Image: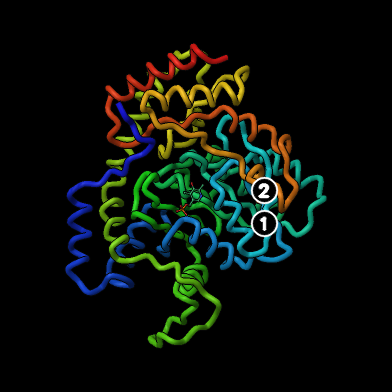
Amino acid sequence: MKIPLSNPDITAKERRYVREVLKTPSLSLGPRLPEFERRGALAAGRKYAVAVNSGTSGLHLIIKALGIGKEDVVITTPFSFISSANCLLFEGARPLFVDIDPYTLNISPDSIRALLRRGKNKNIKAILAVDVFGHPADWDALYAIAEEYNLLLVEDSCEAIGARYISPQTGRRRWKSYRPAGSFGAAGVFAFYPNKQITTGEGGLIVTDRKDMYNLCCSLRNQGRGSGANWFNHERLGYNYRISDINCALGIAQLERLDEILARRERVARSYTKRLSSIEGIRVPYCAQNITMSWFVYVVRLAQDLRRKDRDTAMKLLRDHGIACSNYFAPIHLQPFYRKMFGFKRGDFPITEHVADRTIALPFYSRLQKKEIEYIAEELARSMEKVG
Ligand SMILES: *Cc1c(COP(=O)(O)O)cnc(C)c1O
């Protein structure tokens, strides 16, 4: 048996929507773009959305539009995909990494507070939190910190479209009790690479309630053009981060099927958890009480007493049996160019490193079959008998 790590869920509907665009002359900046954006904004409970050619482009434009740049410092997590920190470097800002909560794997609000209380770091302008693996960050706590220290909040929800967060603190009127990922902070961003819950091939979506952010991001994605009809009127330094109508058509079909796809992924996750919970040395994913996951990946962790080499051995054994798997994530601060730029080393963020040494992302997609899950569970159990 050969089982891939991820597999996009594409049906006749997606193919039909893409074919329909190809019959028109509007392959970019056509009618599918605003339609995709309208539906995307709805999924995040936001007023505005700006579609771009990747999640990374979306993060970059948010940082730029917020005026975060040279001399600025942004608190963020080292346990993420690299672009959630790179977007700061693009603008000459500096990431200030804070370690994670060992359960949710999201940035730890307590550690942020401890750092801010020490008051050593000047120029801290924002917190960029990531909804890791589709588990929303602790937004209630992050809002309280942002308010107290007058910081901007940015949400990297690239892995979390459709996830929900229920505010445990009742009685705060500005909170609706039940909020979707992407609805937090000044702006959020979704990503649509083919391994995400839904895909546009390549693509991303900025979501915000701020009209000024919306206008600025529209201009920045399109070579800094003004809003008028004059195609050669460039009001600022911009980029070509446009997404084609072909990609948007695919995205519209995927958004129409979002609930169905997320429900399938939920079933796969439950099925995994049922079969893997009893394997010695394996810990299944943790979900906080006050959230609803949007399952991006299914990541198990090896027990505390096992080490990185055990994890690597287990992954090799799985791969030898045709089961794709991966070490989600490799800590950002230990990437070669971050070590070189900032002098980071092992030991700087112990929880992140401890977790990252022990994770295995298993094959995960909406149409993963029961048979396949059983086979993966058996092989994982067998490989765990051989390690440690
Ligand atoms: C996927 C992802 C992104 C953006 O990815 P692109 O490949 O640029 O679309 C950003 N942050 C996180 C946490 C991601 O998982």
Where residue 328 appears, x then y in whole percent?
Answer: 51, 36
Q: Residue at x 51, y 44 (%)?
A: 131
Q: Quadrant of the N terminus?
A: top left
In this view, the residue in front, 304 or 312, is 312
Q: Which residue is mark 2?
A: 145
* Sequence-first tag of 2 and 1: 2
* Residue type, numbered disc 1: Leu
Measured along the vertical axis of the image, is residue 388 above or below residue 71? above
Q: Which mark is residue 151?
A: 1
- Residue furthest to the front in view is 320
Measured along the vertical axis of the image, is residue 123 above or below residue 367? below
Secondary structure, mark 1, is loop
Where residue 12 appears, x then y in whole percent?
Answer: 17, 49
Crowding near pointer 2: few (<14 within 10 Å), some, many (20+)?
some
| Distance Cα–Cα, label 2 vs label 1 | 8 Å
Crowding near pointer 1: few (<14 within 10 Å), some, many (20+)?
some
